[in-house]
Amino acid sequence: MLNFVLYCCTFRKDLLRTVKLAQSIRAHNKSNIPFYISVPTQDVELFEECLKDFDVKVFDEKDIFATNPKLDIQKLYQIRGGLRQQVIKSEFWRLGISKNYLVLDSDCVFIRDFDESDFIFKDDIPYSVIHEGRDVLQATERFGPKRIRQHFLADREPIKAALGRTGVTYDYGYAPFLWSAKVWESLDVHYLTPNGMSFLDAVLLCGSEFTWYGESLIHFRAIPIYPREQLFKHYHYEHQLWADQVLGYKEKLLAHDYLGVVYQSNWESWGDFGPSNKSMASRVWRTIKRALKKAQFKISLLAGFI
């Protein structure tokens, strides 16, 4: 079994982003850490063809499901794709490929060189990403969307309660996630199995896979905790990127403190693969609205500095 690998759970719509991620890994992966990608059955051939020039192992996501008979596969494919991907990413450890893994979303991009020491403290013990989510809470408090603080707590408090913890609400993300198989196994052995649950049931109870990991880490202590801040600069909303552009934060500067950047695919829709489901008129109007919003935001931001 390997000590550490890179892993991405993706699908057809994010093909172009995945290729960009693979390009950044090829440029910066100085210790040749293995890179695995899982995709739906119907997308395997497409990804193998488009990534044939990269050192990456593409496999069918259903290979993961076969390792856990407790999973209700029919039910899994009836839930929305985002929740299903949470289950897939969190169950990757069961393949027995690696003791630890970095879960990269397809919209992640590395911006500087890295090796295993950026992720592993010593031996087979990874660092643990633990903070309080203040970057996104402060940004949305000022520029929206509204009620993000309430959503933040709603995605975390039920898991804290399920595992019996009180006190400060921590954040254990965002992508990429740095995970140990030992922590996931501890959740399965000490909580899921005794309660007749699979991880699908856990996600349906509260859909925040990285919070399930983090709270399990703290509660069951399967590994020692060596904390790190977020590994990548994560632009949850485009206004965070616009603010950084005004302030002159480019990737070269970010690379002093971050291994990479996440340009969230929820707003960066122009990176989608394949034809859009929206009409041409709708796409043009969205582009115009985005340009107007960007101009208004920058004027507002600059006015605040005066």
Image (cartoon, rainbow, N blue to C red):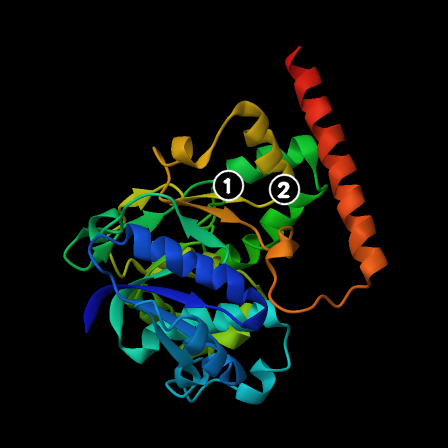
Residue 260: which quarter of the image?
A: top left
Q: CA distance from mark 2 to mark 1?
A: 17 Å
Verify CB contact (< 8 Å) between mark 2 and mark 1: no
Q: Nearer the viewer, residue 166 or 53?
A: 53
Going by the numbered disc 1, the residue's amino acid type is Gly
Say what secondary structure mark 2 lies in.
Answer: helix
**Marks 2, 1: nearer the viewer:** 2
The residue lying furthest to the right in this view is: 281
Name which residue lies at 27% across and 54% down: 29
Going by the numbered disc 2, the residue's amino acid type is Glu
The residue lying furthest to the left in this view is: 123
Q: Which residue is mark 2?
A: 238
* Quadrant of image for the N terminus: bottom left
The residue lying furthest to the top in this view is: 306
Q: Which residue is mark 1?
A: 133
Residue 213, above or below 9? above
Residue 128 percent across, percent down from the top left: 32, 50
Residue 32 percent across, percent down from the top left: 22, 60
Q: As drawn, is 69 to the left or to the right of 161?
A: left
Say what secondary structure mark 1 lies in.
Answer: loop
> Is residue 44 visible from the viewing direction of this image?
yes
Name which residue lies at 39% across and 34% down: 252
Residue 118, above or below 45? above
Name which residue lies at 57% across and 81% down: 76
Q: As drawn, is 281 to the left or to the right of 172?
A: right
Q: Residues within 10 Å of mark 1 (few under 14, many from 20)?
A: some
The residue lying furthest to the front in this view is: 53
Residue 81, above or below 25? below
Residue 303 percent across, percent down from the top left: 70, 16
Name which residue lies at 47% across and 41% down: 168
Q: What number is the disc on residue 4?
A: none
Q: As drawn, is 220 to the left or to the right of 168?
A: left
